[in-house]
């Protein structure tokens, strides 16, 4: 971490510590259907509309279905839990993984969900039947860190602990292509600790960011169909752990292992647009809002920060006093914002209420 960034963080400490002690909800009984509780953000309170206790003891992944009707969460010991957004009642549990789930991705039509686990498998589930549709193991995998569906739904990109991303048919598990992350194998003995993967809305390209345990990482832009060298967007000193492309496909938000910052970069050139510092511990999840105006980030410091994506400034802050946060997701219409906690809770706020 640069001296300048460290100085900026220390200058934020008094404000952040005071904010963490501000009035918030008590982590007790889940809210009843239709209940709400304001979380004060200066003059802009957002009602808390759901506080869901998962059967997983800790949560690592969170996602809304494309139609916004279902919220899914997964973690340790390996369950995928589904809730009906209209009532916040449980709508099912998908079991089969034998170790913690690190990542979830809905298919574009919402009919399936893919999960990647520390049991070294990717599983694709039929949500109507609530049963396993297919299962495959990435090459030499012991942990699967990231899965992402292509916009067409015809493939999933899978990042495990090797320095490659595999493009796989989700129905059959047949490998379509392997993307060998340049420079990774020669500097980290072929191993990574995290992946950030996302497809561009046009389905023609994707970005892959690796987090190497020993020596940084890099962010590349790939042509999905043409076998050409990828474009280096950021490298090689940034161990990427999360990426999200905005709805217009022009910007990419990313975070890095061990870093409390969020960056927004130009998705075509990699040029830095904003560096946003507001957390005091490492960022564990981030997401663009559906309209591209906001970026939400969560951290082990327990804060959820909403950033103005155009200005690169903090727009609002939630301090739910729920311990470390591990994931964040906007509903497809942008009206709801959900966060997952290390203690197995899912918190949902209404961004249009109050």
Image (spheres, rainbow, N blue to C red):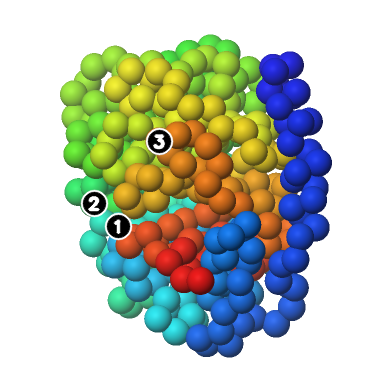
Disc 1 target residue: 107
Counting from the top left corner in percent of width and height, residue 257 is at 63, 32
| Residue displayed at 18% across by 24% down | 226
Q: Which mark is residue 297?
A: none
Say whether residue 40 is visible: yes
Residue bearing the label numbered 3: 310
Element type at mark 2: loop
Q: Nearer the viewer, mark 3 or mark 2?
A: 3
**Residue 75: horizontal and vertical position, in percent?**
59, 60
Element marked by disc 1: loop
| Whether residue 326 is situated above or below residue 110 in the rendered picture | above
> Relative to 199, does residue 1 appear above or below in the rendering?
above
Q: Residues within 10 Å of mark 2 (few under 14, many from 20)?
A: some
**Residue 131 is drawn in which quadrant?**
bottom left
Say whether residue 343 is left or right of residue 271.
Answer: right
Instruction: Identify the image quadrant of the N terminus.
Output: top right
Among numbered discs 1 and 2, the one appearing first in the sequence: 1
Residue wearing tag 2: 153
Q: Residue at x 32, y 50 (%)?
A: 291
Cα separation, mark 3 vs mark 2, equals: 30 Å
Q: Give the x, y percent position of residue 142.
A: 57, 42
């Amino acid at each position: 971490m640069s001296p300048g960034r460290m100085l900026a963080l220390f200058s934020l400490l008094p404000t952040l510590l005071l904010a963490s002690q501000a009035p918030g909800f008590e982590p007790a009984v889940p809210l009843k259907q239709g209940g709400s509780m304001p979380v004060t953000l200066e003059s802009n309170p957002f009602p808390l509309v759901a506080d869901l206790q998962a059967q997983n003891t800790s949560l690592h992944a969170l996602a809304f279905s494309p139609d916004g009707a279902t919220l899914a969460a997964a973690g340790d010991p390996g369950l995928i839990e589904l809730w009906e957004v209209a009532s916040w009642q449980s709508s099912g549990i998908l079991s089969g993984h034998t170790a913690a789930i690190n990542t979830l991705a809905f298919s574009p039509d919402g009919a399936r969900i893919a999960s990647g686990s520390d049991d070294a498998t990717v599983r694709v589930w039929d949500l109507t039947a609530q049963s396993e549709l297919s299962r495959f193991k990435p090459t030499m995998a012991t942990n699967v860190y990231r899965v992402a569906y292509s916009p067409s739904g015809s493939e999933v990109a899978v990042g495990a602990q090797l320095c490659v991303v595999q493009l796989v048919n989700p129905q059959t598990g047949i490998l379509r292509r392997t993307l060998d992350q340049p420079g990774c194998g020669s500097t980290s003995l072929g191993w990574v600790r995290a992946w950030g993967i996302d497809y561009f809305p046009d389905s023609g390209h994707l970005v892959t960011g690796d987090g190497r345990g020993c020596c940084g990482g890099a962010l590349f832009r790939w042509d999905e169909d043409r076998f050409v060298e990828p474009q280096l967007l950021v490298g090689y000193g940034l161990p990427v752990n999360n990426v999200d492309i905005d709805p217009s496909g022009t910007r990419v938000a990313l975070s890095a292992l061990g870093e409390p910052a969020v960056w927004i970069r130009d998705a075509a050139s990699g040029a830095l647009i904003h560096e946003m510092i507001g957390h005091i511990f490492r960022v564990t999840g981030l997401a663009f809002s559906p309209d591209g105006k906001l970026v939400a980030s969560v951290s082990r410091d327990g804060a959820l920060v909403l950033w103005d994506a155009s200005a690169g400034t903090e727009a609002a802050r939630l301090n739910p006093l729920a311990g470390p946060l591990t994931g964040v997701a906007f509903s497809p219409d942008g009206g709801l914002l959900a966060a997952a906690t290390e203690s197995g809770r899912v918190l949902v706020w209404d961004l249009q209420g109050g």
